[in-house]
Amino acid sequence: MPGGSNYLDVSASIAVTIANQAQAALTLSASSTQIAMDSTSALSVTGGSGTGSVTYALVSGAPYCDVDGVTGIVTCKAIGACTVNATKAASGL
């Protein structure tokens, strides 16, 4: 008998929200921060959390260099400076 003879049935519920955690800091480094004309530098990252993929994007300096968004290879096109951003994607559950 679920409620027994002296008490009525009772139930309770609670909503629980599952959220992603913030990632650990991501550090971007280059095989060389000074690149000769028509040469390349390989970018790499350490840190971050999870299994998300890393992508690279040129923030400034398009006249001076190109960056491969998947491999992180920076190619010098002209004398100048470039800034590249690395992003590590979130990983799913």
Image (cartoon, rainbow, N blue to C red):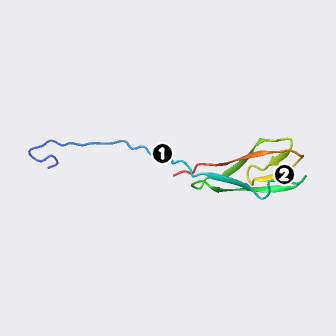
Q: Percent position (x, y) of residue 93? A: 51, 52
Residue drawn at the location 57% of the way across and 54% of the way down: 49
- Callout 1: few (<14), some (14-19), or many (20+) C-alpha neighbours within 10 Å? few
Front residue of this view, candidates 62 and 2: 62
* Horizontal side, residue 6 vs residue 71: left or right: left
- Callout 2: few (<14), some (14-19), or many (20+) C-alpha neighbours within 10 Å? some
Q: Percent position (x, y) of residue 43? A: 74, 55
* Horizontal side, residue 34 vs residue 84: left or right: right
Amino acid at circle 2: Thr
**Residue 57 marker:** none
Residue drawn at the location 80% of the way across and 52% of the way down: 74
Residue drawn at the location 80% of the way across and 45% of the way down: 82
- Single out the residue that lies furthest toward the left: 6
Counting the numbered discs, the total is: 2
**Residue at mark 2:** 75
* Horizontal side, residue 46 vs residue 22: left or right: right
**Residue at mark 1:** 19
Compared to residue 37, the image places residue 9 above or below, namely above
Q: Earlier in the sequence, mark 1 or mark 2?
A: 1
Asked which secondary structure carries label 1, the reply is: loop
Front position among marks 1 and 2: 2
Work out how far the residue at label 1 is from the one at label 2, CA to CA, in angstroms. 39 Å
Asked which secondary structure carries label 2, the reply is: strand
Residue drawn at the location 84% of the way across and 46% of the way down: 65
Q: Percent position (x, y) of residue 39? A: 87, 55
Q: Percent position (x, y) of residue 17? A: 42, 43
Amino acid at circle 1: Ala
Mark 2 and mark 1 in contact (Cβ < 8 Å)? no
Front residue of this view, candidates 56 and 41: 41
